[in-house]
């Protein structure tokens, strides 16, 4: 069997223009952005596998095939990416099953997204190599460096992103910024008995550039600090505009007590898809410095 074209696969899937409109043009654009991202980056992987998978007929045969492993992140736009992947699995069920398509979550929300779309949930311990990961961002600059961690899952998100051959951002246009820390503070995950020590070290490292340094509180739902999936706390810091993302990230990481930062210097982000408030979608690939 020859490798099918991406266009032939996409033609068998629902077209966003034929779906019931969502609550706002922005939501429609976020869905369109996620569908485009999934179609452009997952369907080629599927097309390359179909000639091999089409020859298999029993569970025993499928069980020895190397699966496609996909990272699914969190955020209001990624909801639609998981939705599209679930549709692809249903439409191409003669090729895709729970043995050859595995999804790795970045946190509790994305676990639910995976399960609610009837996708198989795996772990990074069993599947350490991902073909592609889809996730949102709190901010994304023209080089596709990102700030993540608004949902306090930054360590898990970074593990998934860096385990993938390609990382794809799906978000709304409010997340597109000229430089990082444009409107967001930098989240850092900190060992839960180290915030005071870390704050003192931050003052030494950044001096007057450190404008804010706060432990993130979880009120009104729960008294006390936010607790991450890794049982650490989150601090949100402001060191001014971040133009050299790698440098600031490395300066933060060398401080004992900081487990990970919400700065994601672009290592493998191939594209970002932004849903615009007018209902359109903008795709951005990394600009050279």
Image: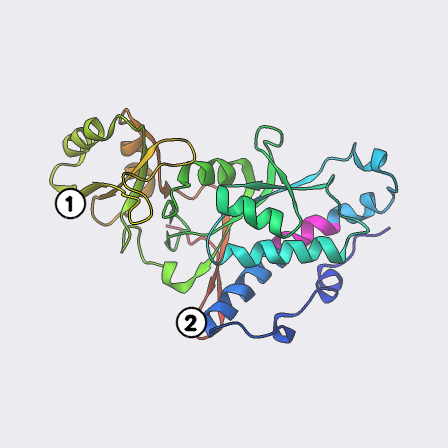
Residue 277 numbered tag: 2
Secondary structure predominantly adopted by residues drawn in magenta: helix
Q: Nearer the viewer, residue 14 or 66?
A: 14
Task: Kindly tell me whether residue 53 is visible in this rendering.
Answer: yes
Residue 185 location, x and y as percent?
A: 27, 48
For mark 1, does the 10 Å Cα neighbourhood hold few (<14), some (14 to 19), or many (20 or more) residues?
few
Q: What percent of the width, then of the height, locates residue 272? A: 48, 56
Which residue is pictured at 66% across the width and 54% down the height? Answer: 86
Residues shaded magenta: 40-47
* Residue drawn at the location 74% of the way across and 52% of the way down: 47
Res 90 quadrant in image: bottom right
Residue 284 appears left or right of 180: right
Name of the residue lying farthest toward the left? 208
For mark 1, what is the residue? 211
Q: Is residue 65 above or below residue 74?
A: above
Q: Position of residue 222 (x, y in %)?
A: 32, 43
Whether 262 is among the magenta residues is no
Residue at the image position 75 percent from the left and 45 percent from the top: 97
Q: Residue at x 73, y 35 (%)?
A: 66
User: What separation in Å lies between label 1 and label 2 (alpha carbons)?
Assistant: 32 Å
Residue 45 inside the magenta-drawn segment: yes
Q: Circle 2 sits in a helix, a strand or a loop, which is it?
A: loop
Q: Looking at this view, is 208 or 105 the one in front?
A: 105
Task: Let me know if residue 167 appears in the view.
Answer: no
Left or right for 88, reference 177: right
């Amino acid at each position: 069997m020859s490798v099918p074209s991406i266009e032939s696969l996409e033609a068998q899937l629902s077209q966003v223009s034929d779906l019931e409109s969502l609550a706002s043009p922005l939501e429609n654009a976020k869905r369109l952005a996620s569908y485009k991202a999934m179609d452009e980056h997952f369907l080629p992987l599927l097309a390359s596998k179909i000639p091999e998978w089409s020859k298999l007929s029993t569970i025993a045969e499928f069980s020895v095939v190397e699966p496609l492993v996909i990272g699914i992140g969190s955020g209001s736009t990624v909801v639609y990416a998981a939705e599209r992947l679930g549709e692809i699995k249903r439409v191409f069920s003669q090729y895709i099953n729970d043995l050859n398509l595995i999804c790795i979550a970045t946190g509790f929300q994305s676990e639910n997204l995976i399960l609610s779309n009837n996708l198989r949930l795996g772990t990074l311990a069993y599947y350490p190599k991902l073909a592609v990961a889809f996730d949102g961002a709190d901010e994304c600059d023209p080089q596709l460096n990102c700030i993540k961690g608004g949902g306090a899952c930054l360590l898990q998100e970074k593990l998934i992103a860096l385990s993938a051959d390609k990382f794809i951002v799906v978000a709304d246009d409010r997340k597109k910024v000229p430089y990082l820390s444009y409107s967001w503070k930098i989240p850092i995950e900190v060992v839960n008995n180290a915030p005071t020590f870390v704050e003192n070290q931050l003052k030494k490292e950044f001096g007057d550039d450190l404008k804010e340094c706060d432990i993130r509180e979880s009120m009104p739902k729960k008294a006390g600090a936010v607790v991450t999936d890794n049982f650490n706390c989150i601090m949100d810091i402001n060191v001014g505009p971040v133009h050299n993302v790698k440098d600031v990230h490395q300066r933060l990481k060398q401080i004992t007590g900081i487990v990970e930062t919400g700065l994601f210097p672009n290592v493998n982000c191939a594209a970002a898809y932004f849903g615009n408030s007018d209902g359109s979608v903008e795709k951005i690939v990394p600009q050279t410095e």
